[in-house]
Structures are given as C-alpha cells and as structure tokens.
Amino acid sequence: MTVAGSSIVAGVDGSAESLDAVRWAARTARLREAPLEIVHALDVSALLAGGVVPPPEEMVDALRARGRRALRTARELAAAQGVADASTGSIPTAPPRR
C-alpha cells in the first residue's frame, strides 16, 4: 500500500554513484510499493562564461543527450530491480533573465 505523495525520487547524472542511488531507490520503491521517479537536471546558468556569456548550443545539446542516456540507463537499472514502471524526466532550467 502506498501513501499519497510518497514517491521515491532519485536524481541521476550518469555517474556510478547516481546509478547506485537508482538501484537503492528502486529496491526501496519495490519494498514500499511506492512509485519511483528518476530525474535529471541541467543547470544551463551554471555554464555561463563569466556569468554572462551562454555556452554554445552544441554543448547544451550534448549535455541534454547525456542526460537522456543517463535516464535511459537508470530506467533499465530500475527495471532490473523489479520496478518496470519508473517514471523519468528532465527538470528544465534556463539562464537567469535580466
């Protein structure tokens, strides 16, 4: 039985440590019969050169692709832990507005 609002959430960046966290979160979600959410965030504002010059769009696209791969891998790991219906998503971020 799950309690409303009791999702297990794991953030991934593709590192071994974040994938270990997904394995732990998936096992916990399975044991608690709770939904599992796997997320990835890209803080484009952290990539501003000198705090003002945006990074090349190719760099942002490559980082977004890396995030999608990390989410795909994490979902596969969750399924291997018995959680086939984990939801995944990216948290959009944008440079600060002036």
Image (tube, rainbow, N blue to C red):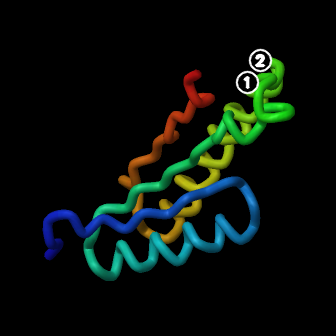
As drawn, which residue projects farthest toward the top? 57
The residue depicted at 37 percent of the width and 68 percent of the height is: 8
Residue pointed to by mark 2: 57
Q: Amino acid at mark 1?
A: Asp
Query: In the rendering, at what x and y percent does residue 28 appear?
Result: 40, 79
The reply to whether callout 2 and callout 1 are in contact (CB within 8 Å) is yes
Residue on which the image places disc 1: 61
Q: Looking at numbered disc 2 in the image, what kind of residue is underneath it?
A: Glu
Nearest the viewer among 76 and 37 is 37
Q: Which of the 4 image quarters holds residue 72?
A: top right
Q: Quadrant of residue 23?
A: bottom right
Q: Which is nearer the eye, 77 or 70?
A: 70
Q: Residue at x 72, y 54 (%)?
A: 14
93 in relation to 27, above or below: above
Residue at 62% x, 29% y is 95
Residue 3 disc label? none
Location of the C terminus by quadrant is: top right
Name the element at disc 1. Answer: helix
Mark 1 burial class by Cα count in 10 Å: few <14, some 14-19, many 20+: few
For the residue pair 16 and 48, the one nearer the viewer reads as 48
Residue 76, image x, y percentages: 57, 55
User: Does residue 33 appear to the left or right of 75 in the view shown?
Assistant: left
Q: Secondary structure at mark 2?
A: helix
Question: Would you call the spot at circle 2 few (<14 residues within 10 Å), some (14-19), or many (20 or more)?
Answer: few
